[in-house]
Amino acid sequence: MTDLLHQENHPFLDFVKKYKKALINTLVLTIVLIAGYFGYTELYQKPRESKAADALFTAEKYFAADSSNLVLNGDGTSKGALYVIKEFSGTKAANLAKYYAGISYYRTGEYNKSIDLLKDFSTSAKQVQAIAFGTIGDAYADLKKNDDAVEFYKKAGAHFPEDEAISAEYLFRAAGLLELNGKNEEAVVIYKDIKAKYPKTEKGFMADKYIYRLQVQP
C-alpha cells in the first residue's frame, strides 16, 4: 500500500494535488465551526442559562404561592418572569417563564396574553404541557371562543392519558362546551370516551348521567 501511495501517478495523490486547496479550506472551516460552537455553548449560552435560572428562582416561589402579579413583575428586588422572557430569550428558563407568566396572566384575567405565552411554551414534561393546553382552553372559553376552547381541551385531554384525572377533566370540559353549543352528539361521544378510558375518575363516574340525559332528550 505504501509503495502504491508513492507512485507518482497514483489516483489518490492526483486527487490530493488537484483538490489540495479545497481540502485545506474545508478542514479550516470545520475547525472554525467546532471552535465557534464550543465558544457559543461554553462561553455564552451556559452562563446565560445560569443567569436566567437565577433570575427566575424568586418568580418560581411566587408562582407556588399563587402571587400572580409578583410572578409577572417581581417584587422590586427580584425580577419577574416577564424580565426573564425578555432578557434571556432562547434559554430553558425563559421557556419555563412563559409557562409561569401564561398561567399567571390567566389567573389575573388577561386571557389573550395568557394564550400567546402558553402557545409559545413547550416542554417534554407531558403533565405540564397538558395543563398548558388546558389553560389555553380555559382562556378561550372565558373569551367565549368555544370552538377554540374545545380544540385545546381535547388536545389537553389526549396529551398525557397516563394522568387520568387531568385527561378526564379536560375532556369533560370539552364535552360541556359542546353540549352548551347544542352539539349533543359530539358531547356524548366524549362522555362515552371518558367513561371507557377513565372509569375510576370523578368525571368517569359522572359520565353515565350526562350520556343518559343527552340521549333521552327529544
Image: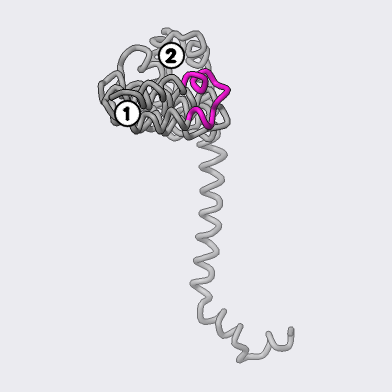
- In this view, the residue in front, 35 or 46, is 46
Give, as a three-letter code, the residue at label 1. Answer: Asn
Please state if 180 lies on the left or on the right of 29 as rendered.
left
Looking at the rendering, the stretch of residues picked out in magenta corresponds to 194-207
Magenta: predominant secondary structure element? helix
- In this view, the residue in front, 73 or 14, is 73
- Quadrant position of residue 154: top left
Residue at 42%, 12% (x, y): give it. 74
User: Does residue 205 lie above or below 23 as drawn?
Assistant: above
Q: Would you name the residue on which mark 2 appears?
A: 71
Whether the magenta-drawn stretch holds residue 130 is answered as no
Q: Residues within 10 Å of mark 1 (few under 14, many from 20)?
A: some
Q: Position of residue 174 (x, y in %)?
A: 38, 27
Whether the magenta-drawn stretch holds residue 200 is answered as yes
Give, as a three-letter code, the residue at label 2. Answer: Val
Q: Dividing the image into 4 quarters, which one contains the N terminus?
A: bottom right
Q: Are marks 1 and 2 in contact (CB under 8 Å)?
A: no
Count of marks, rendered view: 2
Q: Earlier in the sequence, mark 1 or mark 2?
A: 2
- In this view, the residue in front, 116 or 134, is 134
Q: Would you name the residue on which mark 1 appears?
A: 184
